[in-house]
Amino acid sequence: MKTNRSRRFLTLLTALLALSMFAAACGGSDDTESATGTATSECGTNNAVVKGDKVTDKTVAVVAPSDSQDLAFTQSMIDSLTRLGIEPQVTDGTFQVEVAADAIRGYAEDGINVVIVHGTQYGGSLAEIAPDFPETSFIWGTSTSTQDIPNIFAYYPEAQQGGYVNGWIAGELADGGSIGVVGPVEAGDAVSYINGFRAGAEANGADVAVTYTGSFSDVALATEAAEAFLTVGVEVLTGTSQSAVGAVNVANENKIPWFGTQSNQEAWSTDQVVASQVYHWEVILDDMFEMIDEGTLGGEAMSLTLENGGLLVEINGCYNLDSDVLSGAGDIVDQIIAGDINPPA
Amino acid sequence: MSEFFTLSVLIATFASAVRLAVPYLLAALGETIGQRSGVLNLGVDGVMLLSAFGAYYTVIETGSHLLGIGVGLLIGLFMGVVYAVVTVHLHAKQGISGIGIFLFGLGFSDLLSQELVGAIQPIKKLPSLAKLPLVGGIFEPLEDIKYLGQLLFSHNLMTYVAFALVPTVTWMMNNTTFGLNIKAVGENPQAADSLGVSVGRTRFFAILIGNALAGLAGATLSLQLGVFQQNLTNGLGFIAVALVYFGAWRAKWVMAGAMLYGIVTATRLQWQARDIIPNSASDLAAMTPALITILALVLLAKRVRGPAALTKPFSRH
């Protein structure tokens, strides 16, 4: 445990150092602002999440579709709660909506104060459950709507923003070549990310092809989708969902740069993961917990953006991206925040 | 469209189809043997998940793919013993028992993964024959042959094992006493029993072989992908059960079904990568392999008959 703490402290220190070095490398006050949306890790450091100070005394539970250590959608939420000093009760791997509904109702019946319902697909069940438990706050995403139920908060990542930045960098690496995108199902933040990525890459002169495998969890399909892109001659690959690990393996084997999203995916390939758009849900969860502590149990939808720091493009320090590309990415972030670039969702 | 019909792309598509088909083939061959003896096993997916994790974790700990495959096989055998005791000796309903095995495999493999491994970590994939230690040198020149090398010699060892099992299973079922006994107890266990064939023992060993092959299928899947994660099979075991019906309980037709599934899936991925299938039709494209399989099942259902005693427990009393 002590070793873990020391390691976490060291990680925090190196992350801060990397951030300040990046800001210094950009130079000038304008460029420092661009560090809002990007950060470069120091090569060789792990990406352990540092536990923060506890922000609420409320009891919290999470119901999520995939594994809590999936380095993707579910882990992004667990990591964010850890950063807020919260150790939630977790029911993960609930692909079946009925199973998730049982878990949601079970937590509410057990008197848990806040139930985070981490999956768009659970919305229908939640609409039936939430009115039965008016004293419980339900935080549901990804969705832009609270379904007009007063004890539901909604959350959504503007994933197209980080997607655009990833795409722009990918376009630089592809140098006019083609890029393959391994998507899961054409829904939710996967579509936003992919649309943003495509726009960013095309703005930089790359051709982008997208394959939706039809599954969030089928690793074999994601693997073969990436293999199919190799025959097209892609220069860069990206993808989203927990099945993406299969495509990352293909990228790693064939020395093709990879761009991740949702969580930092450097652990899957230190050499080939160039950057990951990371969801920092804690940015909006902090506000929600504050409102809950003050007695407001829902009724508002909040989104992660580059501007509010909920989206962060974490660049792999081991990849040695050209400094021009790094500063260019910083400029893109600035333009998105300023509203000069509006990536399509 | 024209660029799809080039030799190099067609061969790459075929190679992809083979990779996709191998776990289906292994699992479906095992299920074929079990069903010919009269035992339906809906727990194939669960056995595959347990073996997939066992093989993956063994490779993480030892670095040996061979050991990983061995562990996958042993887990399959162990689950086979459990299933055989429950269904053959305790006469439990096969459908419910199978679902129980599936749910156990689904949950327990995930629990083990979270406790023993934690965050998903990729491992080295199963190497092709040319990259195997000791014998790799023999296959290296073969793999380098233009087109033919990729088509025939670029696969991993388990691919050749799976396809070699097709004639082996056919021969065993038609030419050995054990194979003929399997068919006899699957068609008319009372008659087989009256002729001195031990129905219980025959079914027991048929289940054992079937589960061992499911174990190999799971191990092959995780080592071929170089990763394990929750519900890695994604229902593959259930499709393998459907392929047995598709293949009319005959190994060569089961192979044809597995390959058809692989080819359709690989082709649609190639077409999506080349924008031949637009994204707007991606949902439809994703359903294609299942639709074709169902269509084939509907067409075949009227022409073939399964083992008469399938799902029927046997008791002398």
Image (tube, coloured by chain):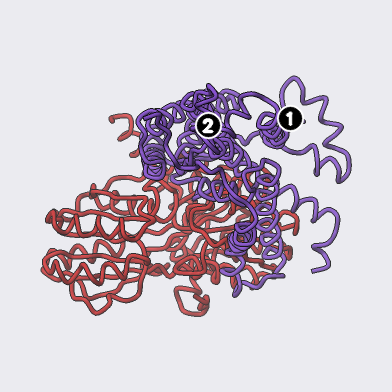
Chain colours: A red, B purple
Q: SS at mark 1?
A: helix
Could you tell me residue B223's position as x and y percent? 58, 36
Tell me if residue B63 comes above or below residue A266 in the rendering.
Answer: above
Amino acid on which disc 2 is placed: Ala
Q: Which residue is mark 2?
A: B191
Q: Chain of mark 2?
A: B
Q: Between residue A30 and residue B105, name the one nearer to us.
A: B105
Dot 1: within a 10 Å radius of its alpha carbon, few (fewer than 14), some, or many (20 or more) residues? Answer: some
Question: Of circles 2 and 1, which is in front?
Answer: 2
Asked if residue A324 shows in the view, the reply is no
Picture quadrant of residue A73: bottom left
Percent position of residue A40, x then y: 49, 51
Location of residue B280 with respect to A100 vertically, above or below: below
Q: Residue B230, image x and y in percent?
A: 43, 45
Q: Which mark is residue B161?
A: none
Left or right side of A289 for B40: right
Residue furthest top in the image: B134
Residue at image position (27%, 75%) is: A146
Report crowding for label 2: few under 14, some 14 to 19, many 20 or more residues within 10 A (C-alpha): few
Marks 2 and 1 on same chain? yes
Q: Nearer the viewer, residue A233 or B137?
A: B137
Q: Is residue B147 left or right of residue A6?
A: right
Relative to the observer, which residue lies in front, B181 or A258?
B181
Residue type for callout 1: Lys
Secondary structure beneath dot 2 equals: helix
Q: Residue at x 64, y 34 (%)?
A: B126
Task: Work out whether A133 lies above or below A68.
Answer: below
**Extreme residue toward the right, this view:** B146
- Image quarter in which the C terminus of chain B is found: top left
Q: Residue under mark 1: which chain is it in?
A: B
Q: Which residue is mark 1?
A: B131
